[in-house]
Image: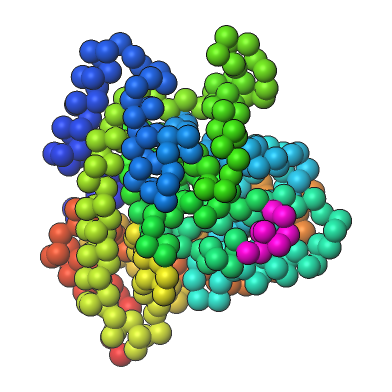
Amino acid sequence: MTLVDLSSESGEAHYRQVVAAAVERVVGSGQTILAEGVRGFEQGFAAWLGRGLSADHCLGVANGTEALELAMRCAGVQPGDGVIVPSFTAYATVAAILRIGANPLFVDVEPDRPVLCPREVERLLADSGNSARIRAVIAVHLYGEACDLRALRELCDRNALALIEDCAQATGTLYESDPIGTWGDFAAFSFYPTKNLAALGDGGMLVLGRRADPSLLAIARRMRLYGWDQQREAVQFGINSRLDEVQAWILSGKLSDLDERIQARRRIANHYRELLGSWASRMGIHLPKDGVNWSHSYHLFVIKVDPAKRQDILSRGAADGIPYAVHYPLACHQHAYIAKRPEAPQYHLPRTENLAASVVSLPLNPYLKEEDVMLISAHLRSILGDT
Ligand SMILES: Cc1ncc(COP(=O)(O)O)c(C=O)c1O
C-alpha cells in the first residue's frame, strides 16, 4: 500500500472543486485560448510575486521548459552561445538551452548545497577568457533551495551576462522575504502537476525581472504565438507556447491558497527535522533547511545517504509502500546525449557527481499526515541504523 501519492494533488476535494469551476467557466464562455483566464492569472501571479511587478512582467506559457527558452531568447542568447548552468538540475533546463542551439557550460554546485556555486561560475569565466561567447547564467533553485542571488546578480552585472532564474521547483521560496523570481533579468516557472503550484497538466510562466526592459514583454508575447502581430502577420521568430484557459483558471483558483500549501510543506519539513535531526547529525546526514536570507519552499525534501545504501532504501520503500525517490540519479553531463556531443569537454564536477550518487527524496506534499511523517522517519532509521 502506498502511504502518500506524490504524483499529483488531483485527488484532493478542494482541487476537484477548482477544476470543476474552471471547466464550467471555459465551457460557459466558449473562450478556450489566451483570453480572460490567462490574463487574470498573469495579473494574479504578478501581484503574488510582489515587488512592484504587474501583468506587464508576466506571460503565461505552455510549460516551464518553454518559459526558459523564451527567457533565453529575450536575453539575446543565439545559437553557438554559451549558457552557464549547474549540471545538477532537471534535464529540462538543459533541453531548453539545446533547443536554441546554445551550449550548456556546466559548473559545480555549492560545497554543502545542491545549487549553483558562484565561485565555480567565476572560475569558469576566468578560464574561458574572452574567447567564449557566454551570454547568460541560469540559476536553478533546485528542490526549493534558493541560489545565492546576491552573489550571482553581482557577478552577472560585472560580466555583462543575463541572469535567468529557473524557479520551476521553487514557487514560494522566499529570498530576503519576497517570493523568488524577481532578482534575475528573467525567471521561468513550471506548473507541472507535481510542482508547488500545480496545473492539471502542463503550464508555465515567463517573468521579466524588475530591471528588464518592459518592452520585451511584447516581443515575448509575439514569440508565444508564432511571431504574429495583432493582424496575424509574422513579424519575428515565434513558437506555439500557449497556456490554455482551463489551466489558467485552475492555477488562479489555486493561487489563492498557495501560501497555505507552502506553509504546510514547511511544517512537514520541520516535523521531519524534529524526528530525524539528532539522529542525522550522529549519522553525518545533512537535512535541508532555510538559509540566513532565504526560506525553503520544500518542493522536495532531499537528504544525502551513503551511495551503497541507496538502493536498499528504495527497494525497502517500494516493498513497504513508501515512495522514496531519487532526483536525480544522473547529472546532466552524465546523460548519454550530452556526453556524446562532440563539443563536450571532460567535466570535473565532483560535488555534482557525489550528489547524483547519494541523494534520496523523502515523501513530502502538503497533505502528508503527521503519522506518515513519523512512520517514514522510523522506516528510514530502521534501514540506515541508529548508532
Ligand atoms: C528545474 C526545472 N527546470 C525546468 C523544468 C521544466 O518544466 P516543465 O516540465 O513545465 O517543462 C522543470 C520541471 O520538470 C524543472 O524541475
Please name whichever residue, 170 or 99, is drawn nearer the observer in this view of the structure.
Answer: 170
Report the residue at 65% width, 37% height from top. Answer: 73
53 part of magenta stretch: no
One can see residue 325 in this view: no
Describe residue 364's horizontal placement relative to residue 118 as left or right.
left
**Residue 6 horizontal/vertical position (percent):** 29, 50
**Residue 171 horizontal/vertical position (percent):** 38, 51
**Residue 81 horizontal/vertical position (percent):** 76, 46
Q: In this picture, which residue range is highlighted in magenta?
A: 154-161
Considering every residue shown, the one lying at the far right of the view is 131
Residue 238 occupies which quadrant of the picture? top right
Residue 262 occupies which quadrant of the picture? bottom left
**Residue 333 horizontal/vertical position (percent):** 64, 56
Vertical comparison of 313 with 90: above or below = below
Report the residue at 30% width, 11% height from top. Answer: 30
Describe residue 161's horizontal placement relative to residue 28 as left or right.
right
One can see residue 274 in this view: yes
Vertical comparison of 275 with 93: above or below = below
Prevailing SS of the magenta stretch: helix
Please name whichever residue, 222 or 361, is drawn nearer the observer in this view of the structure.
Answer: 222
Report the residue at 34% width, 22% height from top. Answer: 36
Report the residue at 56% width, 57% height from top. Answer: 139
Vertical comparison of 337 with 56: above or below = below
Quarter that holds the C terminus: bottom left
